Image (spheres, rainbow, N blue to C red):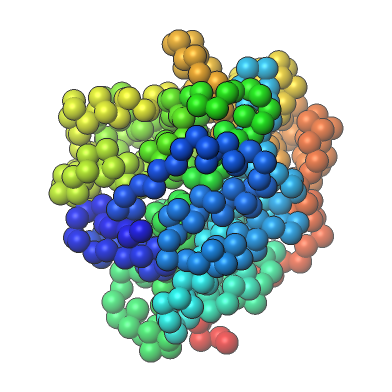
Amino acid sequence: MKYISTRGSGEKLDSANAILKGIADDGGLFAPEDIPSIDLDFINNLTNLSYEERAKAILSLFLTDYTEEEIASCVERAYGGDKFDDVRRAPINILSDTAVLELWHGPTSAFKDMALQLLPELMSVALKKTGEKAEILILVATSGDTGKAALEGFKDAEQIKIMVFYPNGGVSDMQRLQMATQEGKNVKVVSVIGNFDDAQTGVKQIFGDEKFNAALLKQNVKLSSANSINWGRLVPQIVYYFSAYADLLKAKKINLGDKIDFSVPTGNFGDILAAYYAKLMGLPVGKLICASNANNVLTDFLKTGVYDKNRPFYKTITPSMDILISSNLERLLYHITNDAAQVKNWMEELYKTGRYDVGEKVLSKLKETFWADFTDDSGTKATIKSVYEDENTMIDPHTAVAFKAATEYKKMGGKNYTVVVSTASPYKFGRDALDAIGEKTDNLNDFEVLDLLFEKSKLSVPKGLARLKDAKILHNETVNKEQMADAVLNFVEKR
Ligand SMILES: *Cc1c(COP(=O)(O)O)cnc(C)c1O
């Protein structure tokens, strides 16, 4: 299978090259040229397989240039062993009339692990397959979750180094500790004086600086990115939608062929787009519910067909969804229209004016699959409280946003069995989770918060978070925006 640019340059690569490159030459994203299709037997056969075996079955449909052995070893290294704290990897928790798909049992307690544990393995194999001799330097700007998940995924990867920039004072104490204590011989973490945008702009400038890249190449280093526009981050996410369906079959909650709906807390549109690919392949999916917080640019888009990022930006208790440009929407528009020239125009309008309008015809096609809603922080907290009281289950704020949207869709007449996609452990957002159920945490330190949450939720404390209490600080460098490029050079030169 080949991958082509969503903006129509005609560039066509196999998956190994698409994963190494990340983004197409014309600025578009790599999308599969055609979508593999499966039948109900394929799904039925998944029911008695482990998560790893399910992953192999689905990945091999997309990564046709990887051998079965290569895929098997990538999958085992990503999900095998004891990196995940649940043998089912992505278990479903069946509640009274919905199920919650828990994607946070990986090493950093957020759903980013599902993809960022596998991406480095796919990249390492891609380096061998393509004969690439340069060392790859992954640069990441993070507002919290992605940085840690990427560090954990790439630590000690061969022929790859990783450097993460986060805004000084702009991440939670727990997130800072998670990154500052990162081990691994190929990792570097630096905080930037400024906010997330400053860190991200700095990284983008480094990517775009030809002179700088030429200087790196002299040292045999090439830059790459691990953000969610990389196909290697998207494809692992398709797996858990199939896995959830297979688990519901096994639990006799649905019959083979029944359509189910998924409600997905959405930011950059990667997670929900993976569900769309699963549907295109033939997974019986009814509606995909796109759940947003107060930054509801996607809700408006899926209701009106107008994407308009010219609006206030809100900081919410669901920071991983505080986003006004959802990069992966570009892939959806490409598959819905099959018209790369049109997609290119819209993306240029977005860049120039911050707005584009896809028109009635495209909107009605979008609406066949997607439904959208949003909730503000108070609605998010009220949902955490009601799920805690009615279902005896503690959920994180991002999951609550999806839960609320699923409830609203049911009220509008949604009849299918619904799966709420849960993207973070409540432990990652312990203060807000506890606040929602009426517990005060002002006088508690971060580790006392973990203890109180354990008392209230009876969920076991994730090892990766508990361990931070005694972990050594290994990274404490802080730079100005202007010093970021120098910091990169320093890291590269130090071997
Ligand atoms: C990244 C993230 C999201 C948003 O996922 P997208 O793929 O960007 O839409 C939602 N919740 C959590 C906890 C996340 O870390």
Q: Say left or right for 268 vs 458.
A: left
Position of residue 214 in the picture relative to residue 75 (left or right): left
Closer to us: 3 or 177: 3
Residue depicted at 63% across the width and 17% down the height: 97
Q: Is residue 265 left or right of residue 52?
A: left
Q: In the image as oriented, which residue stretches furthest toward the bottom?
A: 218
Q: Please tell me how many numbered marks the rendered image carries.
A: 0
Q: Position of residue 193 (x, y in %)?
A: 49, 61
**Residue 400 position in % (x across, y down):** 58, 28
Q: Residue at x 36, y 65 (%)?
A: 14
Q: Residue at x 40, y 83 (%)?
A: 216
Q: Is residue 454 above or below residue 364?
A: below
Compared with residue 10, is residue 145 higher up or lower down, i.e. above or below? above
Give the percent coordinates (x, y) of residue 426: 68, 37
Task: Please state the horizontal and vertical placement of residue 281, each as a whole percent of the image.
Answer: 41, 41
Point out the residue furthest to the front here.
Answer: 41
Q: Quadrant of residue 431?
A: top right
Quadrant of the drawing holding the C terminus: bottom right
Q: Is residue 233 above or below residue 388?
A: below
Let me know if residue 151 appears in the view: no
Of 282 and 18, which appears nearest the observer?
282
